[in-house]
Image: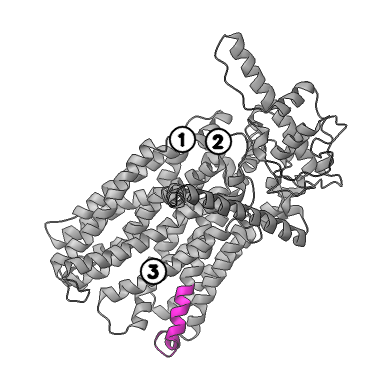
């Protein structure tokens, strides 16, 4: 019988065929009638991951796999479209409210930080145009402090990613979420009211305000990723269909709010400059109009951030539920140091994959932003208006949003998925930066300028439809719950070191040289992803937690489930033989016995409550499951008939929720 630490695993974990020649659908588990067979099949072999013969999708031949995946995806798309139609019939605006509840609000923090974070780069040219002596000629301000804006902003983010990641695993996701919102709100108040007795004093106050705000921004990364992912998994014993089919979409839909933050920031800056500069966006810019423009642009998200503090305090009370369950199962209070140590021992190559891929991506992502002025100069030579730059940036953000949304739509597709999306994105960026390197003058200043523009936009697209979206998801997904926020924060902090490298490096090399240096980070990112990153597309997250429970219990070799299926392991893990113990038949038997242990524990708890004359909570076991375990109490699998196969020989059309009432 399974150890109690194995019990909270979720019954709907996927399984493949018996690697020893038998078949899971005919495994001898015990005498089951038709109703019991249907329920056990729905719990252990959900039809979105297994065909009618009980074969796991990753074990199918490529042609059959493609047909099965297309069938499941098409059926799910029809179901969702039908659901949208029913919602619109009841209330035409209900799909919009659904989108806001499930996509916008979970990513509200990233929307606000995207607004402010990229506002810094948008506002700096405006400040330089109005306060030339301070921001351009450096006669009234120290050049070091004006350049420190990029550095201290990134350093603040790194501090927040590591610090809040640890706090999120220590004190809980909800505490981390509330803390982030509070820090960002205070930071926005500081940015809005930043001032000094001298111009240089104002710059210093502005820079440190930005550093403080960056701490909250950094914390948003691990907190949004982990809370969004764990919310998608669900809190019940059964893994949900939503988790298996749409976990990636749920997280990336929250992440893409960062793109909308950039979009709204640029639109609002354009409108504010027109309002405060007498309807014109052209220079010269008065100091008063510039002050009003940049200060009001920071005051607007402060209002939204204050609402976010309220929402996370009163509407997200269960954000830490999955973490609390994981800690309780391992009898851990406080920070799980053992899990952190074991994670680096067992999943060290995964840390390399997520950290280095994020590092390489941010060299591209922030390099793209830092290079933006050169790109605009190539398109509009002799331009001195910030409005022109802002309009071109708005176009670039629109292209990026297309990449964000396409990533959200395809990231859960089992034929493409996370790993290949990241590799293709890296290679796309590599190509887009490599081509201009061969003849920079032709592309930047000669007749190839329009091709140059196309490659710049394509690099923005492939960055979002690739590593920028995927790194945010997998840095949390490939690690166990107790240290998920820490691992995500560490990987994100390594990414910001890439941004810092780009910011420093670009000060010492000219533009043509940048194109000779930067592309190789894309190639290196693709290579590291291919070797070290596992593909978790379609993998039940609760099954991964079940494997972790075996590892924590010192019984890694006894785990036979789909979390070590070759499809869900990296090339490095496969070469090391991590998947050698994969055996669907043995795993199925284990899961039935673990389910039995869960049931017996629930019955014992129920009996104790009755004996103590306490109010008995209703259990969530179906009558079919209870009847089978009651009839076979005290026995293990001896089997005379299949528990899965119905008399008709088919297993279609089973609702996974029938197992629990």
Q: Quadrant of the N terminus?
A: top right
Left or right? Give the position of 17 relative to 571. right
Taking the spot 38% from the left edge, 78% from the top edge, the residue there is 375
Q: Nearer the viewer, residue 527 or 44?
A: 44
> Secondary structure under badge 1?
loop
Residue on which disc 1 sits: 318
Q: Is residue 315 visible?
A: yes
Q: CA distance from mark 3 to mark 2?
A: 40 Å
Query: Does the residue at mark 1 contact the one at mark 2 (Cβ under 8 Å)?
Result: yes
> Secondary structure under badge 2?
loop
Instruction: Please provide percent x and percent y for residue 190.
Output: 23, 51
Q: Does label 1 or label 2 sit earlier along the sequence?
A: 2
Q: CA distance from mark 3 to mark 1?
A: 37 Å
Check the image and name the residue furthest to the left. 197
Q: Which residues are magenta?
A: 441-458
Left or right? Give the position of 157 relative to 421. left
Q: Is residue 635 above or below residue 546?
A: above
Q: Main secondary structure of the magenta part?
A: helix
The dot on residue 338 is none
Query: Does the residue at mark 3 contact the one at mark 2 (Cβ under 8 Å)?
Result: no
Taking the spot 47% from the left edge, 32% from the top edge, the residue there is 334
């Amino acid at each position: 019988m399974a150890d109690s630490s194995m019990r909270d695993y979720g019954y709907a974990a996927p399984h493949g065929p018996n690697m020893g020649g038998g078949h899971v659908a005919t495994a001898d588990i015990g005498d089951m009638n038709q109703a019991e067979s249907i329920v056990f099949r729905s719990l252990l072999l959900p039809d979105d991951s297994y065909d009618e013969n009980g074969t796991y999708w990753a074990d199918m031949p490529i042609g059959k796999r493609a047909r099965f995946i297309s069938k499941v995806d098409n059926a799910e798309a029809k179901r969702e479209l039908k659901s949208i139609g029913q919602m619109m019939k009841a209330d035409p605006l209900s799909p919009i409210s659904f989108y806001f509840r499930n996509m916008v609000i979970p990513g509200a923090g990233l929307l606000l930080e995207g607004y402010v974070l990229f506002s810094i780069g948008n506002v700096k040219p405006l400040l330089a145009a109005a306060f030339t002596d301070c921001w351009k000629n450096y006669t009234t301000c120290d050049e070091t402090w004006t350049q420190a804006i990029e550095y201290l902003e990134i350093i603040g983010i790194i501090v927040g990613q590591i610090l809040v990641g640890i706090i999120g695993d220590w004190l809980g996701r909800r505490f981390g979420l509330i803390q982030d919102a509070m820090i960002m709100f205070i930071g926005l108040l500081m940015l809005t009211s930043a001032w000094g007795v001298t111009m240089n004093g104002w710059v210093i106050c502005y820079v440190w305000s930005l550093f403080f705000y960056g701490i909250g921004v950094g914390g948003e990364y691990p907190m949004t990723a982990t809370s969004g992912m764990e919310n998608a998994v669900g809190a019940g014993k059964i893994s949900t269909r939503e988790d298996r089919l749409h976990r990636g979409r749920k997280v990336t839909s929250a992440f893409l709010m960062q793109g909308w933050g950039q979009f709204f920031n640029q639109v609002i800056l354009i409108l504010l400059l027109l309002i405060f500069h007498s309807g014109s966006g052209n220079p010269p810019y008065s100091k008063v109009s510039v002050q009003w423009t940049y200060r009001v642009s920071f005051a607007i998200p402060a209002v939204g951030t204050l609402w976010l503090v309220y929402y996370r305090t009163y509407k997200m009370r269960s954000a830490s539920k999955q973490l609390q369950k994981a800690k309780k199962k391992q009898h851990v209070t406080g920070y799980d140091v053992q899990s952190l140590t074991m994670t680096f021992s067992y999943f060290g190559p995964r840390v390399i994959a997520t950290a280095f891929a994020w590092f390489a991506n941010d060299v591209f992502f922030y390099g793209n932003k830092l290079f933006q002025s050169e790109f605009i100069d190539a398109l509009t030579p002799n331009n001195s208006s910030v409005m022109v730059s802002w309009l071109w940036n708005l176009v670039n953000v629109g292209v990026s949003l297309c990449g964000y949304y396409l990533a959200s739509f395809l990231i859960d597709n089992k034929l493409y998925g996370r790993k290949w999306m990241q590799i293709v994105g890296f290679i796309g960026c590599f190509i887009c930066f490599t081509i201009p390197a061969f003849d920079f003058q032709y592309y930047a200043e000669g007749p190839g300028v329009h091709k140059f523009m196309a490659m710049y936009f394509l690099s923005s697209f492939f960055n979002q439809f690739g590593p920028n979206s995927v790194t945010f998801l997998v840095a949390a997904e490939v690690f166990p719950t107790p240290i998920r926020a820490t691992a995500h924060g560490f990987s994100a902090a390594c990414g910001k070191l890439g941004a810092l490298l780009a910011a420093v490096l670009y000060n010492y090399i000219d533009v043509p040289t940048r194109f000779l240096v930067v592309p190789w980070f894309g190639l290196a990112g693709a290579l590291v992803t291919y070797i070290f990153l596992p593909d978790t597309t379609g993998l039940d997250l609760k099954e991964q937690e079940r494997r972790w429970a075996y590892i924590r219990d010192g019984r890694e070799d006894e785990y036979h489930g789909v979390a070590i299926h070759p499809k869900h392991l990296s090339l490095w893990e496969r070469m090391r033989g991590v998947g050698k113990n994969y055996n669907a038949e043995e795993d199925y038997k284990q899961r039935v016995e673990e389910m039995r242990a869960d049931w017996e524990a629930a019955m014992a708890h129920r009996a104790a409550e009755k004996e103590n004359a306490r109010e008995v909570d209703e259990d969530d076991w179906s009558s079919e499951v209870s009847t089978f375990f009651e009839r076979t109490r005290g026995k293990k699998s001896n089997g005379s008939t299949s528990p899965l196969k119905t008399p008709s020989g088919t297993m279609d059309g089973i609702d996974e929720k029938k197992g629990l009432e």
